Structures are given as C-alpha cells and as structure tokens.
Image: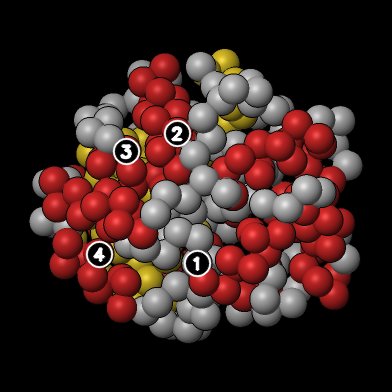
C-alpha cells in the first residue's frame, strides 16, 4: 500500500503497476480497496489504482479543516490524479457516486473514460434506505453509536444496513476491515470526525440535479453498469445516466444488488474488458504483465 500527502491529508492507495492503460477505482461508504478484490485478478494487463478516499474506512485521518463534502472529495480525487501524473484514465466508481462531480467541477481533464457501476446519481445522495442511519450520524455521539452497531453481525447484515448492498452477503472479515479504522483503530476519533463530515455533506436536491446535469459535458466514452435486483438504487437511474452521457451505453446485470463487484465480479470484469477494448480500438486487454 502506497501513500501520498495531498492538500487535505494523506491518501493511501493500491497501485498494481505496469505499463497498461490506467484504471482508477473509487470505493464506497465506508469501504476500502477490498471492495474490488474479486475483480482485480480478472483484469490482467491493466494498471489498476485504488485510492481509499476519506469516506470513513481510511486509515489515516485528514486535516481538521479538510473539505470532505461531496464536492471536496471530487476535487481531492482530481488532485490525486494530478499528483500521480495519471492521464487518460478510466474512472470506475461503485456505490459512492461523488467522483462524477469532477465533471461538474470541470476537473475531469485527466479522465478518458467513465464507468458508473450501480452508484449514487441525480438526487439520490445519499440513497433513501440509508438516510435514517445518516441522520443518526448528525447527532452528538451518533457516529460512535453507528460504528458500535455495525460491529454486531445482527445489525451489519440487516437489510436496512449493509445487508442491502449484496445478494450474496459481504463476509464479516471484509466488513471488519472496512469498519476498523473508525471503530478500534488508533485514529478512530479523527476517522469518525471525517466520516461524519462526509456523511452529512450532501447538498440540496436542486444542486445535486444541477451537478448531475453537467454529465452532458462529458463527451468521451462512458459505460453505465446497473444491477437489476438493486434494493437501494432506482433501476431507471441507469437508463437515465446512459441517455444523459453523450457517449453513454448501458449494461444491466442480473443477480446483483448495489455491490456488483461482490455479487457478479466475473460478469462485471467481462463487461469492463469489452468496453475498454471497443473504446481503445483493440481486440482485447493488453498483454498480461510478467
């Protein structure tokens, strides 16, 4: 795991290296790079870069005055790409959809392709099923209580908590890893502070819709992958996104909820490699790294 110091604080990231085209994967709330653990081995020949954005599973706290709002996170991601010198990247998001606001902020010049995998969109920030939990975060001591509840199997697997995200079920060891920094890590209080700043940062509905409307300006290849059995994200959002993006195309995947990388990793990897090949003029992914 590598680390880079940005204006808001340190960002840990996984970088598989290699000369292949760069795929940048963002993570959900609060999740880390293991969200994509089933997909990465199915993408040989690509350089995969996975920053752990400060959404609550990050291992090092941000500066106390850091802007961790939806807009602030998007700008931080743009800074991350710039500092690493990454260009013509394929930006891939799942669950958290705020990375798209790099476009509304006109900071997506380093993004060559966009892939939106079952993520927040339009005015669905945060998704309706989880809004009661996030209202808890806004209360004094609410973040501490939420993380304590999520440490129990009964609560974390409940369909009103993380049970809604996967039809297969997320293994407890993975959830433990996601929740550890804010629950029992050495910087848990500061991590919970960061988590709360992000969780309570969604702007008003009209602002979200205005930002989403600027996806029309992204005139590069775009893929929308949506789950037909998602219980958190409206199914029609996938079609709306594909129609909004000038070069958008839609693929729907059965047998999955929001975390398609968890429920259908093989189908997702197949969809990604087909899209990458078709939009790069190749017959397939680049040669595997030695």
Tag 3: Cα neighbours inside 10 Å, few (<14), some, or many (≥20)? Answer: many
Report helix, strand or loop for mark 3.
helix
C-alpha gap between disc 1 and disc 3: 20 Å
**Disc number for residue 72:** 2
Whichever of callouts 3 and 4 sits on the residue coming sooner in the sequence is 3
C-alpha gap between disc 3 and disc 4: 16 Å
Check disc 1 and report the residue beneath it: 127
Whichever of callouts 1 and 3 sits on the residue coming sooner in the sequence is 3
Question: Which of labels 2 and 3 is toward the front?
Answer: 2
C-alpha gap between disc 1 and disc 2: 19 Å
Whichever of callouts 2 and 4 sits on the residue coming sooner in the sequence is 2
List x then y, in percent, for residue 80. 44, 25
Report helix, strand or loop for mark 2.
helix
Tag 1: Cα neighbours inside 10 Å, few (<14), some, or many (≥20)? Answer: some
Q: Quadrant of residue 12?
A: top right
Check disc 3 and report the residue beneath it: 102
Whichever of callouts 1 and 4 sits on the residue coming sooner in the sequence is 1
Tag 4: Cα neighbours inside 10 Å, few (<14), some, or many (≥20)? Answer: many
Tag 2: Cα neighbours inside 10 Å, few (<14), some, or many (≥20)? Answer: some
Left or right side of 221 for 7: right
Tell me if residue 258 comes above or below residue 4 in the rendering.
below
C-alpha gap between disc 2 and disc 4: 22 Å
Check disc 4 and report the residue beneath it: 241
Circles 2, 3 touching at the beta carbon (< 8 Å): no
Residue 101 or residue 38, whichever sits in front: 101
């Amino acid at each position: 795991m590598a680390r880079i110091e940005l204006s808001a604080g340190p960002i840990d990231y996984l970088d598989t290296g290699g000369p292949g085209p760069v795929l940048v994967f963002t993570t959900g709330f609060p999740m880390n790079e293991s969200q994509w653990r089933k997909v990465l081995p199915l993408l040989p020949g690509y350089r995969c870069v996975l920053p752990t954005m400060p959404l609550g599973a990050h291992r090092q706290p941000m500066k106390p005055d850091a802007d961790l709002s939806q807009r602030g996170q998007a700008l931080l991601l743009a800074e991350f790409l710039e500092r690493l010198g990454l260009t013509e990247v394929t930006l891939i998001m799942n669950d958290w959809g705020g990375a798209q606001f790099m476009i509304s902020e006109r900071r997506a010049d380093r993004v060559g392709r966009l892939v939106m995998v079952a993520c927040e969109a339009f005015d669905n920030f945060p998704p309706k099923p989880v809004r009661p939990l996030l209202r808890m975060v806004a209360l004094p001591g609410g973040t501490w209580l939420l993380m304590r509840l999520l440490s129990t199997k009964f609560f974390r697997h409940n369909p009103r908590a993380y049970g809604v995200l996967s039809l297969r079920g997320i293994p407890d060891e993975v959830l433990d890893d996601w929740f550890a920094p804010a629950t029992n890590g050495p910087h848990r209080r500061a991590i919970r502070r960061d988590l709360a700043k992000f969780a309570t940062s969604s702007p008003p509905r009209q602002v979200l819709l205005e930002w989403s409307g600027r996806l029309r300006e992204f005139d590069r290849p775009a893929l929308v992958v949506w789950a037909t059995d998602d219980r958190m994200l409206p199914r029609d959002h996938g079609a709306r996104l594909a129609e909004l993006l000038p070069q958008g195309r839609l693929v729907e995947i059965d047998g999955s909820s929001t975390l398609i990388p968890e429920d259908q990793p093989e189908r997702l990897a197949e969809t990604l490699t087909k899209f990458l090949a078709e939009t790069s003029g190749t017959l397939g992914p680049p040669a595997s790294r030695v």
